[in-house]
Image (spheres, rainbow, N blue to C red):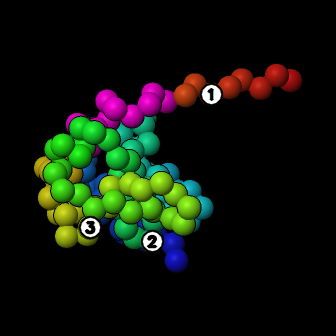
Amino acid sequence: MSTKQETVDFILSSIQAAGDVSAKKMFGEYGLYCDGLIFALVCDDQLYIKPTVAGREYWGDIEEAPPYPGAKNYFYISEDNWDDSERLSDLIRIMLPELPPKKPKKLHKS
């Protein structure tokens, strides 16, 4: 099962206060980006955010689950939390500084 575009559009509209948010399609699922950093995955119409210490402290008791078989656990954000734009946007802003910086693209020698 793959994620519907409507799901991604709804999540993006809910978190737009977090910064410059966008989505990229990846193997029928989506990676979510904020200010150029990937911070979450949307798989099977479910939202999974990369876990960080600051994110855990902010959200409190949060469920964790792998977004796909064999993956590490991410924060699982259930659909009933997607309407809380302020809380989701704050979570993203708080956890972004803990994510590794974007790697520069390698130049290919010709």
Q: Amino acid at mark 3?
A: Ser
Element carrying mark 3:
loop
**Which of the labelled discs sits on residue 42, or is there none?**
none
The residue identified by callout 1 is: 105
Looking at marks 3 and 1 on the same chain, the residue that comes earlier in the sequence is marked by 3
The residue identified by callout 2 is: 44
Q: Marks 2 and 1, how far apart in space?
A: 29 Å
The residue identified by callout 3 is: 78
Q: Residue at x 25, y 69 (%)?
A: 79
Q: Marks 3 and 2, how far apart in space?
A: 12 Å
Q: Is residue 60 left or right of residue 53?
A: left
- Tell me if mark 3 has few (under 14), some (14-19) or many (20+) residues whose alpha carbon lies within 10 angstroms of its own: few
Q: Amino acid at mark 2?
A: Asp
Q: Main secondary structure of the magenta part?
A: helix
Q: Indicate the position of residue 52 as horizontal and vertical percent values.
A: 32, 41
Quadrant holding the C terminus: top right
Q: Is residue 81 magenta?
A: no
Residue 89 visible in this rendered orientation of the protein = no
Q: Indicate the position of residue 60 as horizontal and vertical percent values.
A: 16, 51
Element carrying mark 1:
loop
What is the magenta range? 92-102
Q: Indicate the position of residue 17 as horizontal and vertical percent values.
A: 20, 43
Q: Nearer the viewer, mark 3 or mark 1?
A: 3
Q: Marks 3 and 1, how far apart in space?
A: 34 Å
